[in-house]
Image: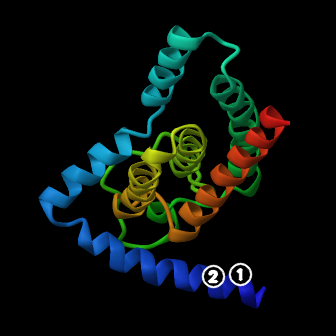
Amino acid sequence: MKLLYAIHHYDTVVFLRFINMCLYQPLYKLCRWVSKSADGYLYVLIAFGVVWKDGVSNPFVQALAIAFMVERPLYFVLKNGLKRDRPQAALNNVKSFIVPSDQFSFPSGHTSAAFMMATLCSAFWPSLAVVLYGWSISVGFSRVLLGVHFPSDVVIGAAMGTGIAYLSLYRVVL
């Protein structure tokens, strides 16, 4: 129990420091744009582009399908099973900069999907790895700066997305 309290305390302190950064209008606009880039439309476009070029038997498409079939259900089970309140509901005098799509915060689905895509795309197009991971890290930061996630939500989302991507790659490659 002490460990959970310590994690929550650290989360709150770091969250409050980050959220104060987003009070600057240009940073808020950038965070909003970065966060919206991980809403899922980009993933569909990438998948359709690869299917259009190479067909559904492409290993990337297969790995992506497996990854999303694991990631989305796991995300929903964790989010609705653990029911961790978002910062706005958990902390007094905190208001998020955007309206979240659901009630609970753990784990960050945007971050999970972004890291999953970055890992999968990097495995097939290694020259894009730095850009893709830079983008996925920015997605995670944007979710905290916009006030809809605690830092640990983002860290676990990143680990979950990366792990699921590696599992799907392992499944497709072997």
Q: Relative to residue 75, is residue 27 drawn left or right?
A: left
Whether residue 3 is visible, yes or no, is yes
Q: What element carries label 1?
A: helix
Instruction: Give the crowd class for mark 1: few <14, some 14-19, many >=20 residues within 10 Å.
Output: few
What label does residue 4 carry, if any? Answer: 1
Residue 54 image-quadrant placement: top right
Q: Which residue is drawn at 15% across and 65% down?
A: 24
What label does residue 164 carry, if any? Answer: none
What quarter of the picture does the C terminus occupy? top right
Q: How far apart are marks 2 and 1 (CA)?
A: 5 Å
| Residue 69: image location, x then y, percent | 74, 30
Which three-letter amino acid code belongs to the residue tagged 2? Ile
Q: What element carries label 2?
A: helix
Which three-letter amino acid code belongs to the residue tagged 1? Leu
Q: Residue at x 52, y 59 (%)?
A: 86
Q: Kindly indicate whether the residue at mark 1 contacts the one at mark 2 (C-beta within 8 angstroms).
A: yes
Q: Which residue is drawn at 41% across and 52% down?
A: 139
Residue 1 image-quadrant placement: bottom right
Q: Name the residue under label 2.
A: 7
Instruction: Give the crowd class for mark 2: few <14, some 14-19, many >=20 residues within 10 Å.
Output: few
| Residue 84: image location, x then y, percent | 64, 60
Q: Is residue 158 above or below residue 15?
A: above
